[in-house]
Amino acid sequence: MARVETLVGGAYQVVRHQLEITGCQVVDGRSLRLLHISDTHYQKGEVAKAEFLASLTKQQPDLVVATGDLVSDDNGITEFLDAMSGLCQLPGLFVFGSNDYFVHRPVNPLSYLVRQPGRRQRSLAVLQWQKVRDGLVGAGWLDLTNARRRLRVANLGIEARGTGDAHAKLDDYATSRQSALTGGEAKIEPDLVIGVTHAPYARILDAFVADGLVLALAGHTHGGQICLPGQRAIITNCDLPSSMAKGLHRYPQQPGKEQPTMWLHVTAGIGSSPSLPLRTFCRPEACLLDITVEPGG
């Protein structure tokens, strides 16, 4: 079951999805409020964007998940981390996208609409991504780059398996699923196993489904960014169908067949491509997933 509503208006919006997940290893019903943010592409001086990020603590999430392409400008790192300081006081998970590592090289804006999935023009200039990573990890967030981690949130044991950016071929899910758990994490029995990645390529999502994950979170698509009326995406910049450019979906979609157990949430993200700072019929967003976890088969 899923339902969506918009909570906050203005240039930036918060979209809430209500989701029920059944068949989990719990003895009674549990609830989890998950805040999903992505593709902030933060650059120095983006005051409105910083204020929006800071305001998200008012939504009182139990867990924050950031799915990459967070900072596009070394000079904006301090401002970004300051804007995130409230959210960083909460439990958090993150992965990076390729634009966290490399300075975005200016290109013809029209190429955004015609480039092929998996092809990108990478700049040789490297961003100071370690500062962002260290700031988030130092605040207690867990880095899921080709790794799995466990934590306990809202009386739920959660195992999260993450990958590097599949768009830049930095993903290694085999390493993620086999990575060792140490210390207190090894003692946590997972009630819920989720996948976290930046770019929702089929090879990653199919691997999540094969492993029986119940929920996957991704960004990267910008919801299509340049959409037609009715929020119809033209592209996803990956091999995900344009009909799944944002929102909450069953994956894979197989008409006439029994639906699989995995939900996929793709957020349209908060920022836009630095080479094309424009959105049409696709407002920037952060997303709340109000999840009810129920036992049963």
Image (cartoon, grey):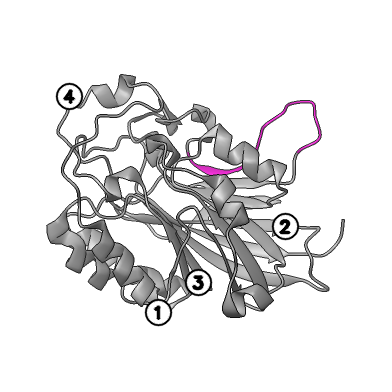
Q: CA distance from mark 1 to mark 3?
A: 11 Å
Q: Is residue 23 above or below residue 230?
A: below
Upstream in sequence: badge 2 or badge 4:
2
Residue to which mark 3 is pinned: 61
Residue type indicated by callout 1? Gln
Counting other residues with Cα less than 10 Å from the Cα at mark 1, is it few (<14), some (14-19), or many (20 or more)?
A: some
Q: CA distance from mark 2 to mark 4?
A: 43 Å
Residue type indicated by callout 2? Ile
Upstream in sequence: badge 4 or badge 3:
3
Q: CA distance from mark 4 to mark 3?
A: 39 Å
Counting other residues with Cα less than 10 Å from the Cα at mark 4, is it few (<14), some (14-19), or many (20 or more)?
A: few
Check contact, mark 2 vs mark 4: CB within 8 A.
Answer: no
Q: Nearer the viewer, mark 4 or mark 3?
A: 4
Residue 21 has which mark?
2
Q: Is residue 228 above or below residue 176?
A: above
Residue to which mark 4 is pinned: 108
* Residue under the image location 26 percent in, 39 percent down: 273
